[in-house]
Amino acid sequence: MKASENKAKLSFTNGSPDVELPIYHGTMGPDVIDIRKLYGQTGMFTYDPGFLSTASCESAITYIDGDKGELLYRGYPIEQLAQKCDYLDTCFLLLYGELPDAQQRDKFHKLVNSHTMVNEQMQFFLRGFRRDAHPMAVLTGLVGGMSAFYHESTDIHNPRHRDVAAIQLIAKMPTLVAMAYKYGVGEPYVYPNNALSYSGNFLRMMFGTPCEEYKVNPVLEKALDRIFILHADHEQNASTSTVRLCGSSGTNPFAAIAAGVACLWGPSHGGANEACLNMLEEIQAMGGIAKVGEFMEKVKDKNSGVKLMGFGHRVYKNYDPRAKLMQETCNEVLQELGLEKDPLFALAKALEKIALEDDYFVQRKLYPNVDFYSGIVQRAIGIPVKLFTGLFALARTVGWIAQLNEMIGDPEYKIGRPRQLFVGPARRNIP
Ligand code: ACO
């Protein structure tokens, strides 16, 4: 963080003295005004619900230019990472700051691959859930429960513990997601096969059974790997900020990541791909493409409470770069599976076309986000809709850990403690 020569001056109409505030430059993106001393100097807080104008930390991991529609992990454009790297290379990059060389790559892949099994006792923990529980409810519990199983990696202030927890979480998330799925459908868990790739192994744990050999389809394996890369990090979004805030109290990494899983579940965040597919199915049931116009009228009517799921983004006010890549993958997967004429995909295309041309969406800069296509790809692969957010959580785990570790290593790190504007009753007495 570099201090600028430029300073901000805050003046008041009631004659209180001006306050000079330092300004800092980052490498890219908006400068920030440092208001840390504001309360001490003025007795006032700033007010910013939803953090619309507040940088909560300094970070060197992910950069988004929402107007350009650009996403960089450690400086590398998402398009290049999606084309030239795999998910584990991306994990290495997010965690350690650089892409691995051949030796580091081999070592990291082996390290992750050799930690895929979970403590056998976790199966009994899982059995405590109802079979019809939402997989995100199960996953929140399982990830939080990891701190009860892996005691050697629960001290967030110990760098070695943080490193071990990172590998354990990245390696075991696919196993936990697949276990949550198999439990729900009443099939036996399939143990990981460490000879397979990260996404190939996940496909086998999801769709394999102990009674026959499972052959990984390379097109689906690549598609899944791309979904994981595209969802690996996204700077200070709601779940990442949740992980940071939770971890800022010094709690263990598993508990902090479980908080992230819980936050991601919401339909305005990671739950959007599930909500998007439910929306497409609803329109399909209403009569399909013929009803798109009618549905769009509801979306534009403020009183209806209906939103076009998979559209709009707090940061991107241009096409989400991940959505473009996902659209490409979507075409490859549908072609591979002979589903090009899939009615939901045709419906999604019709919605996209109308929305991109309609004044309501154009004026508000509402473009498709990554969830718009990722739901269709996952559905084509055979992932049940309820598990979509679970896959997102699996992929985002590395981003959460990288951000958590960055925060703990930051000398300016403090427990997160927002303030408030109190509007409740003033002090009163019980008669
Ligand atoms: N459909 C219809 N109208 C929308 C949509 C949408 N999907 N998104 C935003 N708008 C409208 C709002 O009603 C508002 O209109 P107004 O100015 O007339 O009041 C305007 O566009 C601005 O929207 P905000 O809600 O202020 O934008 P914000 O940045 O707060 O919200 C959000 C972003 C939550 C993602 C929103 O666009 C949304 O709910 N989208 C649908 C859910 C979704 O796809 N979420 C996934 C996000 S990406 C992710 O988590 C991976």
Image (tube, grey):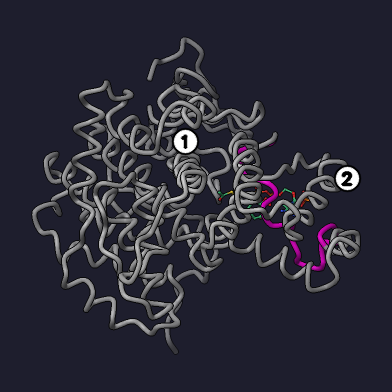
Q: Amino acid at mark 2?
A: Asp
Residue 138 at x, y percent in the picture? 37, 72
Name the residue at 55% across, 46% down.
Answer: 48
Name the residue at 74% across, 70% down.
Answer: 282
Give the residues drawn in magenta, as a range. 299-317
Name the residue at 72% across, 51% down.
Answer: 340
Whether residue 226 is visible, yes or no, is yes
Secondary structure at badge 2 equals loop
Badge 1, how many Cα within 10 Å: few under 14, some, many 20+?
A: some
Residue furthest bottom as drawn: 431
Residue 398, placed above or below residue 412: below
**The image quarter in which residue 308 lies:** bottom right
Secondary structure at badge 1 equals loop
Residue 248 at x, y percent in the picture? 28, 48
Secondary structure character of the magenta stretch overall: loop
Q: CA distance from mark 2 to mark 1?
A: 33 Å
Q: What residue does disc 2 label? A: 358
Q: In the image, 193: left or right of 224?
A: left
Q: Quadrant of the C terminus?
A: bottom left
Residue furthest left as drawn: 152
Instruction: Kindly check if marks 2 and 1 are in contact, taking CB atoms under 8 A apart as contact.
Output: no
Q: Is residue 134 magenta?
A: no
User: Of 415 and 244, which appears nearest the observer?
Assistant: 244
Q: Quadrant of the N terminus?
A: top left
Q: Amino acid at mark 1?
A: Ala
Q: Is residue 304 magenta?
A: yes
User: Of 380 and 243, which appears nearest the observer?
Assistant: 380
Residue 189 at x, y percent in the picture? 30, 70
Q: In the image, 88: left or right of 56?
A: left
Residue 390 at x, y percent in the picture? 44, 60
Q: Which mark is residue 55?
A: 1
- Number of callouts in the render? 2
